[in-house]
Amino acid sequence: MKLPYNPQDKKSVLDYAKLLKGKTLREICDPQILEHNYTGKGNFGQILEKFYFGYEPNSKSEADFFEIGMELKTSPLKQLTNNEYRSKERLVLNIINYIEVVNQLFEESDFWKKNANILLIFYLHQAGYDILDYLIKLVDEWNFPTTDLEIIKRDWELIKHKIAEGKAHELSEGDTFYLGACTKGANASSVRKQPFSEIPAKQRAYSLKQGYVNHIIASIANEATGVYGKLIPSETVAKKQTIEEVVTSKFKPYYGKTIEQILAKTGVELNTTAKSFYANLTKAILGIELDKEIEEFEKAEIIVKTVRLKENNLPKEDISFPNFKYEEIVNEEWDDSNFKDILEHKFLFVFFQFENEKLVLRKVKFWNMPYSDILEAEKVWSKTKDIVSKGKIVKEVVGSTRYTNFPNKSFNSVSHVRPHATNAADTYSLPTIDKLTKAKEYTKHCFWLNNTYVRDEIYLK
């Protein structure tokens, strides 16, 4: 079959691809061949490959348009209330071959051969729509900017190094900044052999983090200008220093200083009672304008947590995460759960300590949860899901106080569950009526990191 474009000519491929913009699969494909039977998340891309670009979907190590070294990737968008588009998910790239990657150099790696030049097709995902009726919104090629590429190279090297240490089974998306190693498989039992350990490792693929994909979308749609402040202004800086080193070097001159001294030194005026105070103080220290987001943090989806320590080094409070919905947690599996997703982020902890009733900056630390501790957190999540599923939230009622069966601090050294609501009437619906109280809804709760864990495993390590 003669193709309607020249696969050896990049301009021809791009011109043909851009005809997709504003169209649906139903509009651009022959109706007779749309009796598709593709299953799984890759549906949209597979149909596009076969019925529009005219080649069979494959899992070859070379790029899809191998003559011009261009890989085709499709990805869903979601539309915000302000009509802007955001990525619905991370962008999954090629499977990591644990056996081969340890012998590869970045420039000759499977990852780079396949993904150096990507043809990106973003479509609007709309609930209830047939896959054939999703509207294609953005089409363009993507080459990694040189500064980003330095960070991605380091991420790739870190993934490779962990595999070489026999720790492929411990890989986490929180290990890296822009390029992640996400689980990829039909189910949790999709595993592969790794070269330096007998422990089977979950199948993983390289992926661009959702925050990074949002930047790609903004760049293609020309919406990225003026919104972000950069920590790493050039490729030259990126070659010399990691994001971690740049951030730490900017904070270090303020170690041992009070909040008042930091404000005086930065020359930035801030409302100390505002909810955004610590976020803005971090920007001031990093030299980022207050009305801008930190580009590298957004791309890497770094979660910043400010911790106030008592004089004995114990955090004044446990660390909360967003509330979970009871009706959602019962339908989750651990590997796809919101809690695990959060724990596999990279965090920046900013530690202040009370000294003579004034807060003094002690240190900052980039951190992601070790594999063994994620397994501990899973126990808290599993027990919570089980309690909600069985309608056994309330253990006893004493007066007007309800005591729950949710895992508390004595249950687990890492995490616990307790209320996170404005008041008792701030509730979520229950999937199963509570057996003791017959309640159909319950006060909002969330997962917390224990303050003793934060002290022992993050601050003091």
Image: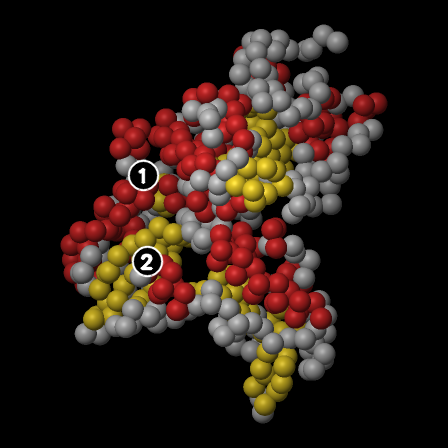
Residue drawn at (26%, 48%) of the image: 248
Residue drawn at (69%, 41%) of the image: 186
What kind of element bears circle 2?
Answer: loop
Q: Position of residue 4 (x, y in %)?
A: 68, 11
Q: Nearer the viewer, residue 117 or 155?
A: 155
Extreme bottom residue here? 399
Residue drawn at (61%, 87%) of the image: 397
Q: Position of residue 24 (x, y in %)?
A: 70, 29
Q: Amino acid at mark 2?
A: Lys
* Left or right, 148 with reference to 233: right
- Figure quadrant of residue 20: top right
144 vs 187: above or below: above
Residue drawn at (60%, 76%) of the image: 405
Q: Which residue is mark 2?
A: 461
**Residue 83 seen in the current view:** no
Tell me the tag on residue 242. 1
* Mark 2 neighbour density, 10 Å: few (under 14) some (14–19) many (20 or more): few
